[in-house]
Amino acid sequence: MGAAILRKSDVMPWVRGLLASYRVVAPMVEGEGTIRYRSLTSEASVVLDGRRPLRSPKEHFLPQVEPLLTFRGTGTALAVAPPAKSDSATVILGVRPCDARALARLDDVFLGRKDMDSIYGDRRKAAILVGLACATPSWGCFCTSVGGSPAGTEGLDLLLTDFGDHYHVAVLSEAGRALVATPAFGPATDADAALAEERHAAAIARMPALFDAEAVAGKVEWEAPVWMRHARRCLACGACSFLCPTCHCFDIQDEVTAEGGVRFRCWDTCQFGEFTRMGAGHNPRPTQTERLRQRVSHKFKYLVEEFGRMGCTGCGRCVEACPVNIDIRSVLAEIEGGER
Amino acid sequence: MSNLETALRETAARLLRDGRVALVLGYEAGSVPFRTAPAFVERAEDVERLVWNPFCTNNLATYLPKVKSVGRVAIVAKGCDARSVVTLIQEHQIPREQVVILGLCCSGMVDVERLVPAGGSLAGIAISTGTDGRLTVESDGDRRTLPVGEILQERCRVCEYHAPVIADEILGDPAGPLTAPVEPFAVVAEMERRSPAERQAFWRAQLDRCIRCYACREVCPACYCRTCFVDKAAPRWLSKASTVDDNWMFHAVRAFHLAGRCVGCGECERACPMDIPISRLNRLLDREVRGRFGYVAGLDPESVPPLGTFRPEDPDPGGHEG
C-alpha cells in the first residue's frame, strides 16, 4: 500500500501532532533504563530504537487489573455502574512484529468465539499499531520458529525500518495511510524499498528456525516425561505468563466495603498453585509438572485445535525472564524431536 | 575452573555411588552459554552433567525443603548459598544430617549484561572459560577477553563470604584470589541521603512496575512458608489488584519477614523480570539487625535468629525506656 520516509528528527513533531487526535502509547525509558509502553506524557523519554520493552503492549488492551463494574448500597437499593468506557482512539508506537501478531492471537480468544469481550474489543477497534522491524534479535527471540518474522506485518498499520537517521515506513492499512498524510513524511523510492527488504532479510538470517512449530502441535502428549524433566526445577512463579504477550487468563474478584464495592478482573496464571485449587481444597493440577504441561499445551495444542493458530509468537520474554532457565524453545525442540 | 568441575563431579559420583546421598543438587549447562540450569542428579553415571563456571548463579538452597523427602541430599553451595543452608537448618526446614554441603569457593558470578557492550545483544554469543579467570566472548563478529572479576554481579562485588561458612566437602581454595568487597551497605546509605519524600517517590515508581509474579519470593530460600500471606484466599489478606499500595504491602511484609534471615544472595533482584532493585530493602534490614543485635544471618547453625527469640537485653526500637 505504499511507503514513506520519516526523518528521526521529525518523529517527535509528528507525535506531537498525533496527540491532538489520539492517545499515544510509546516505549518509554524509566529509572535505570527500563523500557515500558506508557501513555505519552513526557516526550523526552520515548525510545523507539531501544531494546525490546519488558512487556508487550498487551496491557493496553488487557490491563493487569480492570474494573468490570462498581456497586453501591445493598439489597433492593443496590446500584450497579458499568466501568468507564475505554475506546479512546489510540496510536501505539514501536510495536514489535511478534507483539502485533500476539494481539491477533488475543483477538481469536476475546473476539473469535460466540461471546465477545466488548471491553477488549472496544480498545482493539480504537487502536492503530505502528510497528518497528527488529534489526537485532534479543537472546530469547524465536519468532521465525513459530511462523513469524522480525519484519512481520500481521496486525500492523505501519511498519518502520531503521535506516540510521531516518525510517522507512511501509503503509499497511487505510488507518496507517491516514497517519502518514502529514508533511513530516517524505516519499520513499524503489531503492528505499529494496534497502528495507535487504535489512529485513539480514534480520531474518540472524534467526534460523529452531524447530518446526507445525510439527510440534501434533506431538504434544498428555503423559510424557518432557513435562517433569523441565518442571522439576520450576519454582512456580508467574514471570513467564505475566510477560507473555498472548497469555490471557484472568481471575475475577469482588472487593466489598460497607458502602459498596468493585468487581474487577486481574491477570492470573496456570503456573500458580492457587489457579486451579478448588474451594474444598482439591487441586486437579497438583504439581508444576501438570502446570507446565498446561502452559505449553494451551499454546501449542489447544489453541491450534480451536483456532488453527498457536498461542505463541516467539517474543522470547519467557525465555529471558525464567529464573531457572526453563527455555520453551528447548521444550518444543524436544517434543518435535520425539524426546518424550 | 575446569579442575574444580572435575573435582565436583568426582565428589558427586562418590557420594551417589556410596549411597551417601539420594540426590545431588547442582548446576548443568543451560540453554544458552551464559546461563546454567539447576540440575537434579540421582545416578553416579549422570555426574558428567554437572558444571561449575561463573554462570552458576542460582541459589539452590531454595530447592532443599522441596526435595528433602527423597532422603539425604548433597547440594552444591557457593558462599551465599551455604549461608542459606545454615538458615534452613536453624529454622528446622532440613536436619543438618540430611544435607551434604559441597562448598564451592566462589570468586563471583558474571553479570550477563556486561558480557556485551551497552546496547549489544547476547543472541548468538559464544563464550569459553579460561583457567585464568578470564572469559573469551565472541559476538557480532567481535572477540573480547574479559576478566571475570571485572564483570561481576553487584551482589558478588559486595560479597563478604565467598568461601562457604559451612561445608562437608570444600572445593577450591578458601583463600583464593578475591578482590576486597565493596562496602555492602553503601547503597543503603545512598538511599538514606535522600529525603523521605524522594525515597517514597523512588519506591512508588519502582513498585508501580511490580507485576506480582512472585519470582522474588519463589527463588528465595528463606521464603518457604507453605502458604504466603498474599495467597490467603478465605478471607483474602491482600488484594489481587496489583496497585502500587498493594505491591508495597507485599514487598514491605516480605522484607520484614526476612529481617535477620536474609543472607543477601540477591536472587530476588536477579529474578525480578521488571528490574526492581528489591534487595535494597533486605540490605537495609540486614544492616539494622547487625547494628541492633550484633547478628549476621546464616553463619552459625547453632545460633538462634534474633527475631526468632526474645532476650531481656534486646534493644527496643520503639524507644520505650525502662
Image (tube, rainbow, N blue to C red):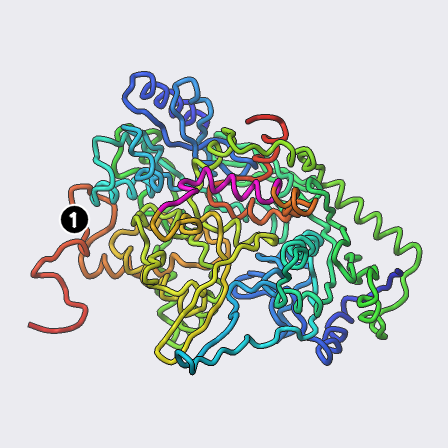
- Point out the image quarter for the N terminus of chain A: bottom right
Residue at 92%, 54% (x, y): give it.
A191
**Where is residue A83 drawn, in percent x and y?**
55, 75
Q: Dot 1 corresponds to which residue?
A: B304
Outermost right residue: A190
In this rendering, the answer to whether A241 lies above or below B19 is below
- Number of marks: 1
What subunit carries mark 1?
B
Q: Quadrant of residue B92?
A: top left
- Quadrant of residue B260 in the image? bottom left
Residue at 69 percent across and 62 percent down: it is A48
The extreme bottom residue here reads: A77
**Which sits in the foreground, B139 or A104?**
A104
The magenta span reads A282-301
Could you say where residue A106 lies in the image, as x and y percent from the top left?
A: 64, 55
Which residue sits at x=75%, y=78%? A17
| SS of the residue under disc 1 | loop
- Tell me residue A272's x, y (percent): 43, 49
Q: Mark 1 is on which residue type?
A: Val
Residue A187 in view in this figure:
yes
Q: Quadrant of the C terminus of chain A?
A: top right
Is residue B62 on the magenta stretch? Answer: no
Q: Residue at x 75, y 59 (%)?
A: A156
User: Relative to residue B174, is residue B118 drawn left or right?
Assistant: right
Please tell me which residue lies in front, A176 or B28: A176
